[in-house]
Amino acid sequence: MQVALSVFSIVGVVFGCGLISGKEIVVYFSKFGYISLPLLLIVLALFFVVFNILLKMGDKVYNRLKNNKISFFINIISSIIFAAAMFAADRNLLNFDNFCIKIFLFLIIFALCLLIFKKGIKSLNKLNIFLIPISIVIFIFILIQKIDHSLSFFEGSNQNLAPFYSFLYVALNLSTGALLIASLGRSLSKKQKAQVSFLSALVLCLILLIANLVLLQNPYAYSAQMPLLSLFKGQEKIILNIIMLIGCNTTLLTIVYSISSSMRGLCKNEILIFVTSIIVPYICSFLGFAFIVTYLYPLASTLGVLFLIDLIFAGRKLSFKPLFKRTDKKIHPSGKNTK
């Protein structure tokens, strides 16, 4: 049960609207064409390795954010960009003609953000174990029906950049969820951490594979605000819209928790923390979902690479301290006790 809870909590971090709308996949994979398919093996390996490292780090991630202001600000900026994209996606998905319904649903989302801000993320983690598996199964089922085995794949362009973007994709998603992932590792054994890392990486790469296959066969959808959603009509589109709302807001709530938790290590002003965690991302969301994913996500990815390198380096340094302490002892002169 603990392994399943951890897996779907981690998947919930990544399973945001950037992924399931298809826009994130277009930016990091599909635009490079069919070469992006074998690169998913690299993504699988990277997810597994970094998940495992973060799970083992535990409180060291929080301590690093508290003690290193550069890492702290990098994490905050990346998280605000990610949260802004989720708010922008909500605005697109809640595109009701009735203004009152739209405002009411946005107020519910804000209320949930405030709840996570005040109470933490334990209740969301428990909810993820039901919402995320159901959402994934429905999402994959709908997409599989869209794959046409008679169609060829989009060839793409600038394929030499594809491996680099694969690294950036992993950094983007792991940097913003590092605090949550590390906190999950506190209650897991070494064997469970390996299991959680592998299963989380496998589930995410399966989703990426199927969504990417669909997009590679429908390149005309790349310019849409939400490419995958634009491919469907009627009942399927309504269901996919609901799945995207679930994925979008599980990620949004995780990021609100991440920003607020990391800020509390340096700041005691709850109003400032609230504004940074919720209000600033909401204001930034008016840049638009497509704009944020296309232009600001690569920036967040680059910052994420720096953030993860710093975390992993700091974690290795901390883990070797006992070794150095053992050698840092006074050595008595050999002739002191000899005649």
Image (cartoon, helix red, strand yellow):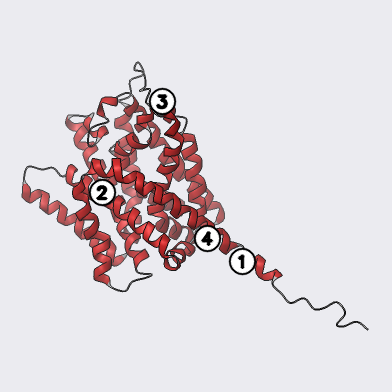
Residue 321: mark in rendering: 1
Give, as a three-letter code, the residue at label 2. Answer: Met
Inter-mark Cα distance, 4 to 1: 11 Å
Q: Is residue 254 visible?
A: no
Inter-mark Cα distance, 2 to 3: 28 Å
Q: Is residue 184 left or right of residue 282?
A: right
The earlier-in-sequence mark between 4 and 3 is 3
Q: Would you name the residue on which mark 3 appears?
A: 34
The residue located at (74%, 77%) in the rendering is 330
Identify whether 117 is placed above or below 6: below
Q: Would you name the residue on which mark 2 appears?
A: 86
Mark 4, secondary structure of its residue: helix
Give the farthest residue toward the right. Answer: 339
In this view, the mark in front (4 or 2): 4
Inter-mark Cα distance, 1 to 2: 40 Å
Give, as a three-letter code, the residue at label 1. Answer: Lys
Q: Is residue 337 left or right of residue 210?
A: right
Give, as a three-letter code, the residue at label 4. Answer: Ala
Q: Is residue 94 visible?
A: yes
Q: Would you name the residue on which mark 4 appears?
A: 314
Residue 257 in which image quadrant? bottom left
Mark 2, secondary structure of its residue: helix
Observer-nearest of 197 and 22: 22
The earlier-in-sequence mark between 4 and 2 is 2
**Image location of residue 189, percent across then percent down:** 54, 57
Q: Is residue 170 left or right of residue 15?
A: right
